Image (cartoon, helix red, strand yellow):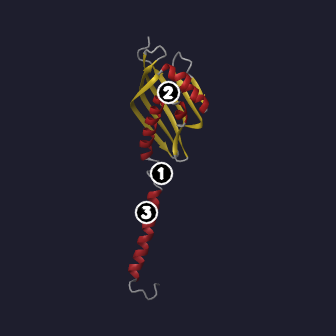
Amino acid sequence: MFGNAKHPRVILALCLFAVVAIAGVAVVESSPATLGLGLDAATQLEGDYSSHLQTVHSMNVSAIEQDYTSDASVQFSVPGHETTGNHTGLKSIGILFGADMFPNFALPNFSRLNSTVKVLGSTATLDSTFVVNGFNSDASPQTAKVSSHVEYVRQGGSWLIRFESWSFTFPNAG
């Protein structure tokens, strides 16, 4: 089989080892953890959402829009306020944050209470509860508890928000 090779079993073993090593590298390179899927994706998404809230805190509408797909929708549920509704598309989402949210929560600060992430291939959901503090248009302190639901899709190597809903509860509303 190996002609006049002095150690055919050694050569065969080295060939087998090389094939196993190449196959092992292929498996590691395509594992969920290295593709941003699976368990590491949950950690990544929690970080991405935390960064998203920091971007909202910055009140930079064009930076906020970069967190979304071009056809994304955002829904705010605020009892008794006109911001309740579904805003689809980047322009509408920009208006929602720039014209509706920021006058009601100038300099919003977020403190996260908890989040749960579920990843399935190139889609994921994140459910979170957090507190937002800021100042309303009268410069009075404003606090709300928010329950959020976010649907992410992986596009071009990044997780982008396809749908986001915030349901506000005002603990001191009278």
Q: Is residue 84 left or right of residue 41?
A: right
Neighbor class of circle 3 (other Cα within 10 Å; few <14, some 14-19, many 20+) is few
Q: Residue at x 60, y 28 (%)?
A: 92
The picture places residue 157, in percent across and down from the top left corner, at 52, 47
Alpha-carbon distance for marks 1 and 2?
Answer: 29 Å
Q: Residue furthest bottom?
A: 4
Q: Residue at x 57, y 18 (%)?
A: 82
In whole angstroms, how far apart are the C-alphas of marks 3 and 1? Answer: 16 Å
Secondary structure, mark 3, is helix
Whichever of labels 3 and 2 marks the residue nearer the N terminus, that label is: 3
Q: What number is the disc on residue 12?
A: none
Is 64 in front, or is 12?
64
Q: Find residue 53 and report its horizontal and vertical position in percent.
A: 45, 32
The residue that disc 3 covers is 24
Position above or below: 79 against 35? above
**Secondary structure beneath label 1:** loop
Q: Residues within 10 Å of mark 1 (few under 14, many from 20)?
A: few
Q: Nearer the viewer, mark 3 or mark 1?
A: 1
Pick whichever of labels 3 and 1 is earlier in the sequence. Answer: 3
x and y, in percent, of residue 81 in the image: 54, 17
User: Tag on residue 166?
Assistant: 2
- Nearer the observer, 166 or 65: 65
Residue type of the residue flagged with mark 1: Leu
Residue carrying label 1 = 35
Horizontal and vertical percent position of residue 90:
59, 33
As drawn, 50 above or below 170: below
Q: Give the SS element for disc 2.
A: strand
For the point 47% across and 34% down, the residue is 52
The reply to whether the C-beta atoms of the residues labelled 3 and 2 are less than 8 Å apart is no
